Image (cartoon, rainbow, N blue to C red):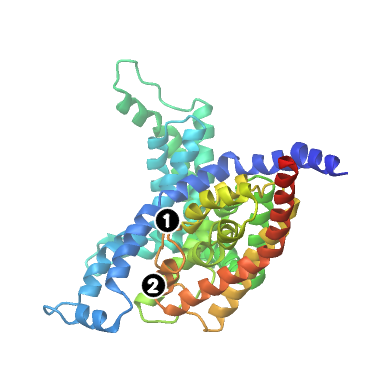
Amino acid sequence: MAQTTNNFLNQKMIPFFQKIAASRHLTALRDGMTAAVPMIIIGSVFMILAQFPIPAYLNFMAHTFGKNWATVLQYPTNASFHIMGLIAVAGISYQLAKSYKVEPFSTMIVMVGAFLLTIPMKIDKAGALWVPLQQLDSAGLFIALIVGLFATDLYVWLVHKNLTIKMPASVPPAVSSSFASLIPGGVVLTVVWIIRLAVEATPMKSIPNIIIFFLQQPLSQLTNSLWGALVIELLICILWIFGVHGGNTVSGVMMPIWLGAMAQNASAHAAGKALPNVVTQQFWDNFVHMGGAGATLGLAIMIALFSKSAEYKTLGGLIVGPAIFNINEPIIFGLPIVLNYQIAIPFIVAPLVNVVTTYIAMSTGLVARTMGVMVPWTTPPIISGYLATGHISGVILQIVNIILDGLIYYVFFKRMDRAKLKEELALEK
């Protein structure tokens, strides 16, 4: 029976999930969105400096040398947070075109233009045309994803149909690439323009309004709910048990929503308003996945401190360091957790418990919500809890979650440790 189950997993389930994780569009979406992370981290550093949650520091920043330095320090934050959509469409289209072996830079330029074409421009009193900055940040993320994926597919299809201008071999490559993009680029922009005109003839009036109404609002409500978060976490854990990187697979789809929720919290925090979202990127990185997927920091600590078997004692010394920085591939493949029915239950239950405790604590106000600071996912717990929320309650919640995770893993870990010790003693005889 066990052999039949393993064969089914190895021959059917694992290849299926690996195929999904490695799909062209999901990979481009994940890698393209990753391009925005450095800018978000840079903006977060300046946000921390501008709004470090110590009253005396904030007072000093607001009344020194006749200038509000908190506002000045947030200039780089505005220049990074408010271009997430622009970076996303550029990164996704670049990665997707490269996967099709189509010249990526020219494709990216066309998609940036197509993205801007979807945005209703504003005209000031002097007659100057300008782009609303909010349409380039989280508000425009869904449009950026659609343009980056589907408009790029149209562009690539046209290129593969040889609907391009061929230049002589003597023409420099840069010039040749530019002319090659004229026809497919023109078609893409024309199609987007026609869609925009059609939308403007409806009560929705603009493409951003349609995306917000039909996609962003419903999905945000789902992912910002407890049940939605539980479903997402369950999927992440199940994929990992089958040996597929659950975080990469799921975040490729959900990261734009989580980053968008993070940006909304950041804007609300800067304006002194109540933070609207519980489920953000930091919700997962800093409170659910402590130690990595499966919330394995508690398990790693127990293996390092309480193992009786020689094998697990050695393993514990190797895995606890990376686990502190939320890197748990050593424990996932070293214990192992992949395809290990003995540890699968706590690997699923522990992070689900973290989702419940964190969501309830933040939604009820017992713990401060994440304030929109992009805390790197490798930041150790305790530090990350304070940076993400700006409050000691974030630290306390992390400690509680780590203890709960350890208790959930304890019985399963001890059973495995006893079995391993028994094997070692039998070999010594």
Circle 1: is it few (<14), some (14-19), or many (20+) Cα within 10 Å?
many
Residue 48: quarter of image: bottom left
- Residue bearing mark 2: 267
Position above or below: 346 against 360: above
- Residue 108 location (% of width, % of height): 40, 41
Callout 1: SS:
helix
Residue at image position (48%, 58%) is 324
> Horizontally, is 380 left or right of 301 in the view?
left
Does residue 206 appear in this view?
no
> Horizontally, is 359 left or right of 155 in the view?
right
The amino acid at mark 2 is Ser
Residue 166: quarter of image: top left
Does residue 359 appear in this view?
yes
Query: Quadrant location of the C terminus?
Result: top right
Q: From this viewpoint, which residue is outermost toward the right? A: 1
Is 289 in front, or is 319? 319
> Horizontally, is 203 left or right of 337 in the view?
left
Position above or below: 159 against 61: above
Is 422 in front, or is 375? 422
Is 53 in front, or is 71? 53
Of the residues under marks 1 and 2, which one precedes in the sequence?
Answer: 1
Q: From this viewpoint, which residue is outermost toward the left? A: 65
- Residue bearing mark 1: 85
Marks 1,2: beta carbons within 8 A: no
Q: From this viewpoint, which residue is outermost toward the front? A: 429
Q: What is the C-alpha distance between the residues marked 1 and 2?
A: 16 Å
The amino acid at mark 1 is Gly
